[in-house]
Image: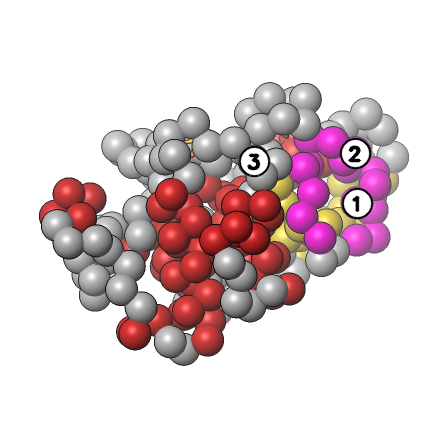
Amino acid sequence: MKITVTVNGTDHARVVEPRLLLIHFLRDDLGLTGSHWGCDTSNCGACVVWLDEAPVKSCTVLAVMADGRRVTTVEGLAAGGALDPVQEAFAECHGLQCGFCTPAMMMTARWLLDNNPDPTAAEVREAISGQVCRCTGYENIVRSVLRAAKQDSGAAGAVPWLRPGEGAAIGGVEGLPCFPGGLPHALGGPRGDHSPGEGTA
Ligand code: FES
Ligand code: FES
């Protein structure tokens, strides 16, 4: 079937098999490997993207179901070369370890903050409850989202986000980026040689 999907603002016309999943269309046909394929059974949530304005697990959506619709992936988070506050907050608060869950976590986080600009920690946990992180224990993910909410509102500078001594432990302190060499692929940066903390495409 021929489909046309608008992905991160660009129209893509392709002929696809009716059984092709959206996650494979994004990764294999379009080369957008920021969205990850973890389980294929709708359990892990590593494949979350937006279909129009709503987060979906793209392993549960056929590519043909996206025909004529808009898809937003982690590669579309940074607008005009400027990182989204969610990307900045995940880097600053160390909201990732291996990075496998991170792109999808950030897509859900941006959706949450667009619909609930000042969430509680419990509301953040509920929003990401369908997504699994095997590394972080979720604490820094929640803090990252809350930090991004403050950045969105312009109040980030007033928000302490590291406990005493934690900056040295995680390799970053307030005002200094955790990734001075550039944003890793897991946070929406360009794909390059794999390095520790960069995540798996
Ligand atoms: Fe889609 Fe795991 S790959 S939920
Ligand atoms: Fe979440 Fe590794 S699975 S950072």
Image quadrant assignment for residue 42: top right
Gap in Å between the C-alphas at discs 3 and 2?
Answer: 20 Å
> CA separation, marks 3 and 1?
22 Å
Res 177 label: none
Task: Look at the image and tell me whether residue 87 can be seen.
Answer: no
Residue 78 in sight: yes
State the extent of the magenta-drawn residues as a range.
Answer: 54-71
Q: Name the residue carrying label 3.
A: 131
Residue displayed at 59% across by 48% down: 127
**Which residue does the image show at 46% across and 71% down from the upper left?**
152
Quarter of the image for residue 184 reads top left
* Image location of residue 139, percent across then percent down: 38, 43
Q: In which quarter of the image is the C terminus?
A: top left
- Name the residue at the bottom extreme: 154
Give, as a three-letter code, the residue at label 1: Ala
Marks 3 and 1: CB-CB under 8 Å?
A: no
Report the Cα–Cα distance between label 1 and label 2.
7 Å
Q: Residue at x 36, y 35 (%)?
A: 136
Image quadrant assignment for residue 39 = top right
Q: Mark 2 = which residue?
A: 62
Q: Is residue 92 magenta?
A: no
**x and y percentages locating residue 177 in the rendered image:** 23, 57
**In the image, 19: left or right of 164?**
right
Q: Is mark 1 on a helix, strand or loop?
A: helix
Q: What residue did someone put label 1 on? A: 66
